[in-house]
Image: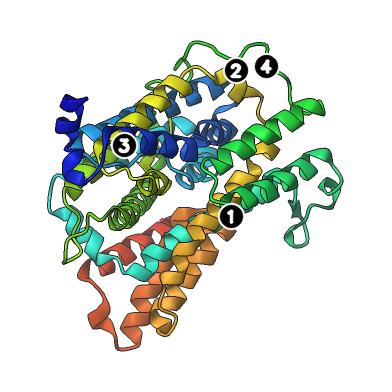
């Protein structure tokens, strides 16, 4: 124990080994829902038969990246396949280009992230994007997830006249009622600050579904991990043929700024920020995130990113990488062997989780300065465009273009970072390409 304490500098951070381990367990309980939600989400693109492989990829990438975070950066931050990014992967990129191309795009994005994490370019890009758009992107992704969750529970349905409408046929179905119960249960547990509220909700809803015969009871609880369906299934030729520069760019932008915002918030909560607002060892943190993404793509999952749920472990007193290592080990021990359970779980079980993750992500939008329309209007357009176009890329593009134009034509060109002009032009070309201009 003394050797472990010295390696992670536990006492220097005012903590104890016991406290760090408890914090790691708490973080795992808070974000373990991703082991169930991510396979279900990606299976929409890869097929139900891929769920065991996706689960293995999810657990391995989360375990590896989180342990690496603890060992390399000595921070209590946990990582896993990011919510929002997995939805973009499954419902936007994969249907258009194929899921193998989507994996290739994630891998390339991770490599770019690694390069930028090792150079000063990372800081330049980070400083070029206005905070209002950073906050709006996170919130827009949150509403995107909520929209998907409402569809999974049947509350929102397609409509020829209005595009979407109330799913009247679902309102009396038992699946819908269970989903509503889960939404209320999770909300109450969150309000009571119960650790693992989302995971508890998934477990309870699954049991209820089994009792009413809506979910098959698994013939076994554990099985050996497999990557047969997803390992090294990246299609680089397809990526080049698709001309998916916008896809790579969108994966990168969301991953980059979501990670930066999450790490900043977690660092502030843990007391890491210096007087001038800098984060010690930020390069190591971002490098870990980037490596996790590249490894995850090779294994067969969408972008790996730092989770805001790490705050639960920090709240329990976790201050060092020992917390992260504990969480990572649990991802490996639990996640690699539960595919028989994950396979039977239905969309209506996880729908409340998607809705409430959207609620958590929406909170960032309140950081937007609404007293300045040149900041608030582009942010608002990002917020609504992401869910309504079912595309994070389109939402980011609309935000970058409108922000640049509104500022420039309002005589506030000095507020625009030079890189924003380049990014706006890139997205103009991206939309022209989508519109068939060339």
> Do the residues under discs 2 and 4 have CB atoms within 8 angstroms?
yes
First in residue order: circle 3 vs circle 2: 3
Residue to which mark 3 is pinned: 20
Find numbered disc 2 in the image and state the secondary structure of the residue it sits on.
Answer: helix
Residue to which mark 2 is pinned: 340
> Do the residues under discs 3 and 2 have CB atoms within 8 angstroms?
no
The correct choice, above or below, for 422 with respect to 8 in the image is below
The one nearer the camera, 5 or 277, is 5
Residue to which mark 1 is pinned: 191
Give the farthest residue toward the bottom: 411
* Comparing labels 1 and 2, the label whose residue is closer to the camera: 1
Is there any visible trace of residue 365 in the rendered image? yes
Q: Quadrant of the C terminus?
A: bottom left
Q: Where is residue 217 in the image (x, y as percent from the top left)?
A: 72, 19
Find numbered disc 1 in the image and state the secondary structure of the residue it sits on.
Answer: helix
What's the CA distance linking mark 3 and mark 1?
A: 25 Å
Left or right, 22 with respect to 108, comes to: right
What's the CA distance linking mark 1 and mark 4?
A: 32 Å
What's the CA distance linking mark 1 and mark 2?
A: 31 Å
| Residue at (32, 60) in percent of width and height | 426
């Amino acid at each position: 124990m003394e050797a472990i304490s010295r390696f992670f500098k536990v006492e220097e951070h005012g903590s104890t080994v016991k406290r760090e381990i408890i914090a790691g367990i708490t973080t795992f309980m808070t974000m373990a829902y991703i082991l169930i939600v991510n396979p279900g989400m990606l299976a929409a693109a890869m097929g139900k038969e891929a769920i065991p492989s996706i689960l293995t990829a999810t657990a391995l990438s989360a375990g590896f990246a989180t342990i690496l975070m603890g060992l390399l950066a000595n921070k209590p931050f946990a990582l896993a396949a990011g919510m929002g990014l997995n939805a973009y992967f499954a419902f936007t990129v994969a249907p258009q280009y194929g899921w193998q191309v989507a994996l290739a795009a994630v891998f390339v994005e991770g490599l770019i992230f690694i390069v930028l994490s090792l150079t000063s370019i990372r800081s330049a890009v980070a400083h070029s994007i206005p905070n209002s758009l950073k906050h709006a992107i996170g919130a827009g992704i949150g509403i995107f997830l909520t929209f998907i969750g409402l569809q999974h529970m049947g509350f929102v349905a397609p409509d020829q006249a209005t595009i979407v409408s109330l799913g009247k046929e679902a309102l009396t179905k038992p699946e819908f009622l269970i989903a509503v119960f889960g939404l209320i249960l999770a909300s109450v547990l969150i309000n009571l600050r119960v650790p693992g509220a989302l995971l508890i909700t998934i477990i309870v809803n699954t049991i209820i579904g089994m009792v009413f015969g809506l979910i098959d009871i698994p013939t076994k609880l554990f099985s050996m991990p497999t990557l047969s369906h997803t390992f090294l299934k990246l299609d680089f030729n397809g990526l080049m043929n698709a001309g998916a520069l916008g896809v790579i760019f969108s994966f990168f932008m969301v991953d980059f700024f979501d990670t930066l915002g999450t790490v900043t918030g977690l660092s502030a909560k843990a007391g890491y920020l210096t007087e001038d607002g800098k984060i010690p060892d930020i390069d190591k943190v971002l490098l870990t995130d980037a490596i996790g993404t590249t490894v995850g793509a090779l294994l067969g999952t969408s972008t790996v990113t730092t989770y805001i749920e790490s705050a639960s472990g920090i709240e329990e007193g976790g201050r060092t990488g020992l917390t992260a290592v504990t969480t990572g080990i649990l991802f490996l021990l639990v996640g690699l062997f539960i595919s028989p359970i994950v396979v039977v779980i239905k969309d209506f079980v996880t729908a409340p989780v998607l809705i409430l993750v959207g609620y958590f992500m929406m909170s960032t939008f309140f950081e937007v300065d609404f007293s300045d329309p040149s900041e608030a209007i582009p942010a608002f357009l990002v917020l609504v465009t992401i869910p309504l176009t079912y595309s994070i890329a389109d939402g980011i593009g609309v935000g970058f273009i409108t922000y640049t134009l509104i500022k420039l034509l309002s005589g506030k060109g000095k507020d625009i970072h030079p890189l924003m002009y380049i990014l706006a032009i890139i997205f103009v070309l991206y939309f022209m390409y989508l519109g068939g201009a060339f």
